Image (cartoon, rainbow, N blue to C red):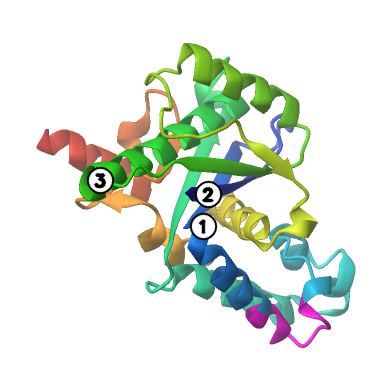
Amino acid sequence: MHILYVDDSGSVGNPEEDFFVLGGVAVFERGLYHLIQDVDKCVSQFGLGRAEDIELHASEIYSGKQGVWKRLSRADREPHLHAVVRLLADPNASIRLFAVAVEKTMISPRDPVELAFQEICNRFNLFLQRHHNRTGENQRGLIVMDKSRHERPIQTLARTFRTSGATWGHFRYLAEVPLFVDSEATRLIQLADLVAWATRRKYEHADGRFFDPLIPRFDSDGGVIHGLYHAKGRRAEDCFCPACLTRRSRDQRV
């Protein structure tokens, strides 16, 4: 089974923020233990205490307003973020990244959470379908998300998608509706938080320092990035982000 851990970044109701993002890290079940060990080893090298006592929450590390991060300067905090980014960007890591950046005003009146969730489910389902077509393995997928204010509506959406289908039909390779867990209890949700945060910093603030190294790790096939999607209504043709560029390139070849 492949498991996609998902977290969000940005506030749907905040008019001062343009983007809402869902980010995810997909890993095959047998790789979970080793990935968690690698993250704990990385955190232990921060020298801030026991790794199991330190939660990786990207916005808190960057702002330095909470927890152990308050006693560190920005210059001391940012290398810790880059260390985790390098872990995710490692080409030898058996993971795939996913992210959906929704430009809220451009897709209005659609619900940004619904659109982002449907897109990330679709892209994970397509990844599983490609894997099945190439290997013949009948692997299913499971989505695990951070407990948040979006839990109830997303559970309702997931049930609807399973019974009635979404825009692209049924997500036949997803085994169950999403499971919700506390981010403090699982490193993989914390990694998904970093993917979502780094993606939103790229789109919201044009800051690609934490996002750009991750681009090769987004699910792709034949030079086309499938795991990254920028939802901006009908104006995608004037965007030069990796998602929109690779989508135009694919459309031109068809």
Quarter residue 57 falls in:
bottom right
Q: Give the mark nearest the N terminus, 2 or 1.
A: 2
Front-most of 193 and 92? 92
Residue 208 in view, yes or no: no
The three-letter code of the residue at mark 2 reads: Ile
Where does label 2 land, which residue?
Answer: 3
Where does label 1 land, which residue?
Answer: 29
- Queried whether the magenta region covers residue 32, the answer comes back as no
Where does label 3 land, which residue?
Answer: 136
Residue 222 in view, yes or no: yes
Position in image of residue 242 (x %, y %) = 35, 50
The three-letter code of the residue at mark 1 reads: Glu
Q: Residues within 10 Å of mark 3 (few under 14, many from 20)?
A: few
Position in image of residue 102 (x %, y %) = 53, 34
Q: Are marks 2 and 3 in contact (CB under 8 Å)?
A: no
- Queried whether the magenta region covers residue 48, the answer comes back as yes
Position in image of residue 96 (x %, y %) = 43, 56
Front-most of 32 and 59? 32
Residue at 14% of width from left, 36% of height from top?
252
Q: Residue 191, labelled with which disc?
A: none
- The reply, left or right, for residue 9 in relation to residue 209 is right
Element on which disc 3 rests: loop
Which region shows up in magenta?
41-51
